[in-house]
């Protein structure tokens, strides 16, 4: 629950015009330059979301082989395997959270790019017909949760120094 329950999001926050090309509204332009698109925020649709879930994080690239090349003159030294040493020191970078790896994967290859994320569709918007009382209650609860998530995201963005939103005075 937000602390400004009697105010709306637009009454509490405003868009930072210096970070939005001088516009005081959510402005998205078509960007066709590859380098500029890489700098934009990556997103996904329903189909792509299923792909990222199935594939998982990107594999690490350009690593040395896990074995060592033999020396020119063989010695009778005993080589130890590296997996025990890695386990003793806490392991490798494979312990990173899956969500962060998927986000990096999405940022690397996604075709869905934007400066401003598209708003979520309200719950029950695409359902044909009138909902009954129980469905209405469930729809209203989902809508309230969506609004609280949106409020929290905008508040976190306003708290960042380079965020897209500013808190109104």
Image (spheres, rainbow, N blue to C red):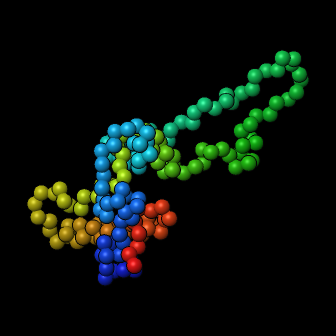
Q: Is residue 169 above or below residue 159?
A: below
Q: Is residue 146 above or below residue 168?
A: above
Q: Is residue 86 visible?
A: yes
| Quadrant position of residue 14 | bottom left
Horizontal side of residue 68 vs 62, given as left or right: right
Residue 116 placement, left or right of 100: left
Name the spot of residue 162 as percent of width and height, x first: 48, 61
Residue at (75, 47) in percent of width and height? 88
- 162 shown above or below 9: above
The location of residue 44, given as percent across then percent down, is 35, 46
Residue drawn at 58 percent across, 49 percent down: 96
* Most foreground residue, 43 or 169: 169
Q: Is residue 54 visible?
A: no
Horizontal and vertical percent position of residue 109: 43, 38
- Left or right, 7 with reference to 88: left
Query: In the image shown, does 23 or 104 lie closer to the viewer?
Result: 23
Q: Is residue 8 left or right of residue 135?
A: right
Q: Tally the numbered discs.
A: 0
Give the residue displayed 50% in from the left and 65% down from the top.
161
């Amino acid at each position: 629950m937000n602390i400004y329950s009697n105010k709306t999001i637009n009454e509490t926050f405003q868009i930072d015009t210096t970070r939005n090309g001088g516009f005081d509204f959510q402005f998205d332009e078509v960007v066709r330059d590859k380098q500029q698109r890489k700098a934009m925020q990556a997103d996904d649709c329903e189909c792509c979301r299923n792909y990222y879930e199935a594939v998982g994080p990107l594999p690490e690239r350009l690593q040395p082989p896990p074995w060592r090349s033999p020396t020119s003159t063989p010695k009778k030294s005993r080589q130890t395997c590296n997996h025990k040493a890695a386990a003793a020191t806490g392991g490798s970078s494979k312990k990173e959270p899956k969500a962060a790896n998927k986000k990096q994967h999405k940022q690397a290859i996604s075709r869905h790019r934007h400066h401003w994320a598209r708003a979520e569709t309200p719950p029950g918007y695409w359902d044909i017909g009138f909902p009954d009382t129980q469905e209405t209650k469930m729809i209203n609860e989902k809508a309230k949760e969506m609004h609280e998530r949106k409020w929290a995201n905008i508040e976190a963005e306003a708290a960042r120094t380079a965020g897209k939103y500013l808190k109104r005075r």
